[in-house]
Amino acid sequence: MPPYLPFPERRVSTAYRDLLRTIREEGVRVETKQGIDARAVAGHVMRFPMAHGAPVITERSIATFTGKAIGELCAFINGARTLDELAQFGCDWWGPWANEKKCRSRGLETGDLGPGSYGHAFRHFTTNLDHDDPGFDQLAHLIRKLRDLPTDRTALISPWIPQANHRESGVKSRNTIAPCHGWVHALVFNDKLHLVHNQRSGDTPIGVPSNMLQYAALGLMIEHLTGYEFVEYVHWIQYAHIYENQLEHVDEMLSREPRRLPTLTLTEAGSRVTNIHDFRGDHFVIHDYEPHPALRDIPVLT
């Protein structure tokens, strides 16, 4: 388990609100293909020493979504790329990105996210998009690498299969949405695990809080399977943005005082898992979570 301090001894966290404020106050106004302008910054880092709690935001409650968010990552680790496969892990919100129109335009069956999607890249990474190829299991390899060569600096995974995501005039990618998150670098310093998560694009009011939780959970999975204590989570976003129709909700979050971060741990069942593919969303539990009230109806753009 990460080296959590007792809850009253933890520092309050301002990392997520600092991200929101930076975009709100300094972001460049940009047009988007979703039809709603956004404010964006190029490059922002959030650092979370695990002693002071897991990166589960407190500016609004996400308590009802935590298991589902981690379940989605578990689905991707297991190669899920269709709506039916995702549903087996409790993930039921991908429909707008895998509808008949989007899939048909990319030569895919309805409900298929495509060979450039997260699940395919994580479990079956391959550049051979048009043939039956078992590909390369990135997460299983990452665990073996950390066990065998913990100081090698090459324990990385990527969701990006270049030709599946290639776009230019008149050319569509081979997936219904380009991967936004999932570039991971696991680093071991003096037998302590630091997990760096690089995100290509982040909708900071909606998607980023889930991604923070998901990859912190991955850090716990890696800690459990390798024995290296998980001491720091680092979240880097290259294109961090807020849509204009989300600003009212962002201002509400920024008006709320910062609070201490909670404790994220494995359940007893989770602590018996011995294979990265066997984790599920209900293998994780959050304690000491004292967020501000949830915010309803923050716009989600597809």
Image: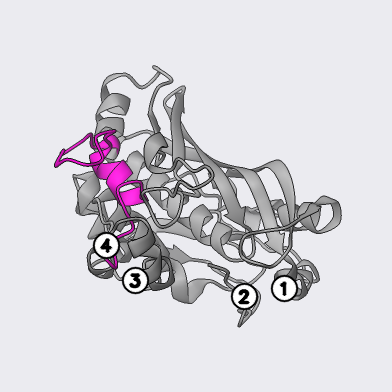
Q: Amino acid at mark 4?
A: Thr
The answer to whether one can see residue 99 in this image is: no
Query: As drawn, which residue projects farthest toward the front?
Result: 170
Residue 16 is situated, as x and y percent measured from the top left of the image, at 67, 55
Viewer-closest of 175 and 259: 175
**Magenta run includes residue 76:** no
| Of labels 1 and 3, the one closer to you | 3
Name the quadrant containing residue 93.
bottom left
How far apart marks 3 and 4 lie (CA) works out to 13 Å
Residue, disc 2 = 299
Query: As drawn, which residue projects farthest toward the right?
Result: 25
Viewer-closest of 224 and 82: 82
Residue bounds of the magenta highlight: 110-138
Task: Say left or right for 120 vs 253.
Answer: left
Q: Amino acid at mark 3?
A: Glu
How far apart marks 4 and 2 lie (CA) works out to 24 Å
Mark 3 or mark 2: name the one nearer the start of the chain: 3
Q: Secondary structure at mark 2?
A: loop
Mark 2–mark 1 CB contact (< 8 Å): yes
How far apart marks 2 and 1 lie (CA) works out to 7 Å
> Which residue occupies 42% across, 66% down?
97
Residue, disc 1 = 245
Residue, disc 3 = 100
| Of labels 3 and 2, the one closer to you | 3
Which label is found at residue 82?
Answer: 4
Mark 1–mark 3 CB contact (< 8 Å): no
Q: Is residue 182 above or below residue 226?
A: below
Mark 4 or mark 2: name the one nearer the start of the chain: 4
Residue 162 is situated, as x and y percent measured from the top left of the image, at 41, 35
Residue 25 is situated, as x and y percent measured from the top left of the image, at 85, 56
